[in-house]
Amino acid sequence: MIDWGALLVPAAVLLIVPLAIIVGYRRSTGSIVVSGALATVAFAVFWLVLGGANSLYGDSANYVIRTLIFFGGVLITLAAWVLSLNASAQARRWIWVGILLVAVYLTLAAIYASFSIQPCFDVSGGEFSCTQPDPLRQALTFLGYLACPVAALVYGVYGSRPFGRRARTLPDGLTVSSLNAETVADATRAEDAESAG
C-alpha cells in the first residue's frame, strides 16, 4: 500500500515553481525575480546554515529537510533559468542569453563537483566519514551554486533595460515631426491654391 503522507512533502516541493509564477504575475519579469530570489535563498540556507553537500552524508537527523531544500533549490533554479532565458531570447537580448547560459553551466558544474569531488568513505557501523575540504574549494562551489539564481535575479530586475548608451531625450518643449508631414502640407496648400485660382 502507498504511504500518501510520505509523498505529500516531496510533492509540495514541486509546487514551488507554480507558486513563484503566481506570486510574480503582476510584473512581466516578476516570476523571474521571485524564483531567482527563492533559489538564491534556498542555496544560501543549504550552504551557510546546513553545511552544504557534506551535510547530506552522516547525521540523519535533518536529512529530509536538507534534501528537500537542496532539490527545491535546484528545481527553482532551473525554473528561474528557463523563465529568464525565454524572456531574454524573446526580447532579443543576446548578451543576457549568453550570460544566462554561462551561469547555468557554472551552477550545474558546481552541483556536480560538490558531489563528485568530495571523497566520503563508509566507516564501520554504516556511517559516512567525509574529509574536510579546503575553504577555497567550498567558497568557489558556493559561488558556483549561486551563479544561475543570481544571474536570473539580476535579469529580472535589470533585464528590460538595454546595455550600452541610453536613448537620448529631447529637451522640454522640443518636438520632432516627420519630414513626410511637411511635404503633405505643401501638397495640400498647392491643391488649395489651384482650386482657389
Image: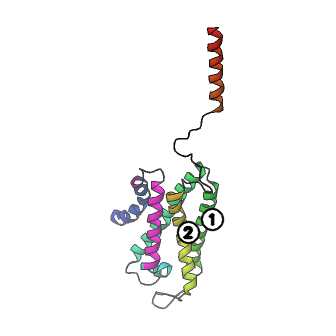
Instruction: Please state, as top left, top right, bottom left or bottom right, where the N terminus lies in the image.
Output: bottom left
Viewed as shown, does residue 153 lie left or right of 182? Answer: left
Query: Which residue is most to the left?
Result: 5
- Compared with 134, 63 (above or below) is above
* Element on which disc 1 rests: helix
- Figure disc tally: 2
Residue placed under numbered mark 2 in the picture: 147
Task: Look at label 2 and name its amino acid.
Answer: Ala
Location of residue 96 in the rendering, given as x and y in whole percent from the top left corner: 60, 58
Viewer can see residue 1: no
* Frontmost residue, 8 versus 104: 104
Asked whether 37 falls inside the magenta stretch, the response is: yes
Q: Kindly check if marks 2 and 1 are in contact, taking CB atoms under 8 A apart as contact.
A: yes
Please, what secondary structure does the residue beneath circle 2 have? helix
The answer to which quarter of the image holds residue 19 is bottom left
If you read the primary sequence from the N terminus, does the residue marked by circle 2 or circle 1 appear first?
A: 1
Q: Is residue 45 above or below residue 85?
A: below
Way the structure is coloured: rainbow
Q: In this orientation, which residue lies closer to the viewer: 76 or 192?
A: 192
How many neighbours does mark 2 have within 10 angstroms: few (below 14), some (14-19), or many (20 or more)?
many
Horizontal side, residue 59 vs residue 146: left or right: left
Q: Position of residue 70 (x, y in %)?
A: 46, 71
Q: Nearer the viewer, residue 155 or 162?
A: 162
- Give the label on residue 148, or none: none
Looking at the rendered image, the quarter that the C terminus falls into is: top right
Residue that protrudes farthest toward the bottom in the picture: 124
Magenta stretch: includes residue 116? no
The disc placed on residue 102 is: 1
Please rate how many residues cluster around mark 1, counting C-alpha atoms within 10 Å: few if below 14, some from 14 to 19, many from 20. some
The part of the chain drawn in magenta is 22-48
Q: From mark 2 to mark 1, how far is it between C-alphas?
A: 9 Å
Q: Residue at x 50, y 78 (%)?
A: 53
